[in-house]
Image (tube, helix red, strand yellow):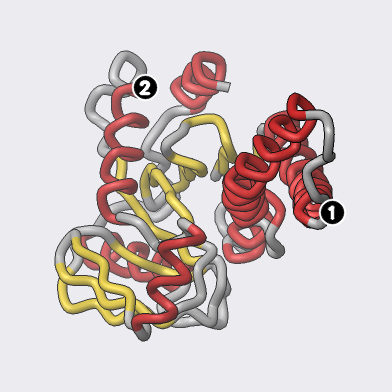
Amino acid sequence: MRIVTNQRLAKRNRQIAFWLMIGTLGVLVGSFLLMMQNPIEGNPEISALVLLFQVLVLPVAFVLTLVSVRMTNLWARPPRPEDAIEEGLKGLSNKSVLYNYYHFPARHVLICPQGVFAIVTRWHNGSYTVQGERWKTNQGIFSRLGSLIRADGIGSPSLDAQRAAAKVEKQLADIAPNVDVTPLIVFIDSEAEVTIEESPIDIVFADPKAKPSLKSYLRDINRDNAASGKKQSSMPLTDEQIEAFEEATT
């Protein structure tokens, strides 16, 4: 399998996450020290400025914390999605191509004998119930409140995956108009618990030891293709179409 990763974007965002964390710590320490200060007597202008800083610094620190945590979860939290997906795809046909971070909102695009897949990932490790396109987080009220404050909820993976597939299909429209793009949700953390009552989108784990795993999902497609008489080694796109897609989007 060939892997094409937007290393420049990934490295830049990991650096941003790191410096945001450092900046957040600096603001928090600075805000604490500032709160310890009393207005300077005899100088109303400086006193007003200190009070203004005291009022503004905590909201700024809060916003920086939220952004820092989100960037860290998306770009720096181990294992990184591109690494976990690569590990989960070991043994896949060497004709396959995995693109990372070029086709947002599809964070990853996989072209392999089983089809073309627009992949959205989730790093979360909580317990969830899927009812159609609706995702319910199974946690207590205080955990939900904490997640709401941190703005790190599961979101709407099903809708995100559908948008991702639509975007990739649009990018392929002039190159391979008859190729369907399959949306796919991949959990990076195998500790997540997902109860599927009904889902229009397939949900798998990157970890090959988890169930259902990305690897087993692709094997099931192979079995279905074999049962229908479809060639196992055929690719959904020709080499020329893959090259054209790559030139247009990476």
Q: Secondary structure at mark 1?
A: helix
Where residue 152 appears, as percent x and y from the top left, is 48, 59
According to the picture, the residue beneath numbered tag 2 turns out to be 171
Q: What label sits on residue 138 in the rendered view?
A: none
Label 2 crowding class (10 Å Cα cut-off): few <14, some 14-19, many 20+?
some
Residue 95 appears in which quarter of the rendering? top right
Q: Residue at x 83, y 33 (%)?
A: 42
Q: Secondary structure at mark 2?
A: helix
Q: Earlier in the sequence, mark 2 or mark 1?
A: 1
Asked if residue 26 is positioned above or below residue 42 in the image, the reply reads below
Residue 140 appears in which quarter of the rendering? bottom left
Where residue 222 appears, as percent x and y from the top left, is 36, 63
Q: Residue at x 47, y 71 (%)?
A: 146
| The residue positioned farthest toward the front in the image shown | 42
Question: The residue under label 1 is which amino acid type?
Answer: Leu
Q: Nearer the viewer, residue 35 or 201?
A: 35
According to the picture, the residue beneath numbered tag 1 turns out to be 33
Where residue 219 appears, as percent x and y from the top left, is 42, 68
Of marks 2 and 1, the one in the foreground: 1
Residue 80 appears in which quarter of the rendering? bottom right
Report if the CB atoms under discs 2 and 1 are less than 8 Å apart: no
Label 1 crowding class (10 Å Cα cut-off): few <14, some 14-19, many 20+?
few
CA separation in Å, label 2 and label 1: 52 Å
Where residue 199 appears, as percent x and y from the top left, is 19, 66
- Drawn side of residue 94 relative to residue 13, left or right: left
Question: The residue under label 2 is which amino acid type?
Answer: Gln
| Quarter occupied by the C terminus | top right
Q: Residue at x 70, y 38 (%)?
A: 53
Residue 1 can be seen in this image = no
| The residue positioned farthest toward the bottom in the image shown | 140
